[in-house]
Image (cartoon, rainbow, N blue to C red):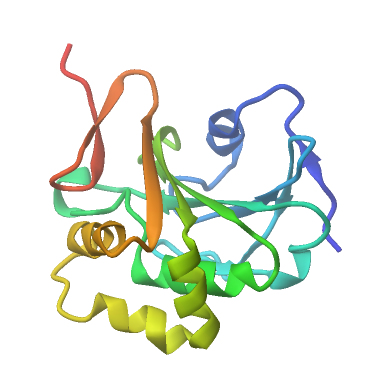
Amino acid sequence: MQSVVFLGGKSVAQVVAGWHDARKREMAWLKTPRGGLIPAALEREFCSCGIDWKVLQGSARTLRHTHVAQSFGANIGLSLPSIMDYASVARALQHGVTHWHVATVDDLGKVRGYVSFVPTAKFRELASRDNDSISALNAGCKDKVELNRRMREQGLVRLRVTPMPGFRYLPGVGLFVRKPE
């Protein structure tokens, strides 16, 4: 069992900013009801992060996960959940996780914003069949913007976008960008 890393009054953005390779590899934590974070990442890579399902325990119900951005111009939908994220959510539901947050981390290691999503009862029913049912939702989607539009239109997830101060969200491209000065 991993130890809990308490935030000590810091925001998740501050914790991410202090992590030595946050801008190079994806990260994941389980958030406890008292504000602590349990590291839950396995096999951290630039564009993926495995989840250590053994740490999903007790009353913790929220997973925090990052998407890494090296160049925002070429990453359509970067800030949005991917089909791999949704497949992970389907598995996380079996462990009692009910909320998922994706933080976009820029090349300076700073959080630009969060996309939070909650799977609906319809998603849970689909996920209870098998992961292939979730993966099939990606068929015919040209990018993550289209995938997430489909997920919302079919009533499978509720999404909320929260830009950090100084940033705004571009819904047509699924990215957080710096506000013009």
Residue beneath the point at 17% across and 11% down: 181
Q: Quarter holding the N terminus?
A: bottom right
Q: From what the image shows, is residue 163 above or below residue 142?
A: above
Residue beneath the point at 26% across and 76% down: 138
Q: In this view of the protein, which residue sits in the foreground, 108 or 96?
A: 96
Image mark count: 0
Q: Could you say where residue 102 lies in the image, as x and y percent from the top left? A: 45, 49
Q: Could you say where residue 85 lies in the image, as x and y percent from the top left? A: 44, 66
Residue beneath the point at 83% across and 57% down: 58
Q: In this view of the protein, which residue sits in the foreground, 114 or 118?
A: 118
Q: In this view of the protein, which residue sits in the foreground, 178 or 70?
A: 178
Q: Could you say where residue 32 lies in the image, as x and y percent from the top left? A: 75, 45
Residue beneath the point at 15% across and 46% down: 73
Q: In this view of the protein, which residue sits in the foreground, 4 or 22?
A: 4
Q: Could you say where residue 52 lies in the image, as x and y percent from the top left? A: 68, 69
Q: From what the image shows, is residue 137 above or below residue 29?
A: below
Would residue 48 be seen by someone viewing this image from the given angle?
Answer: no
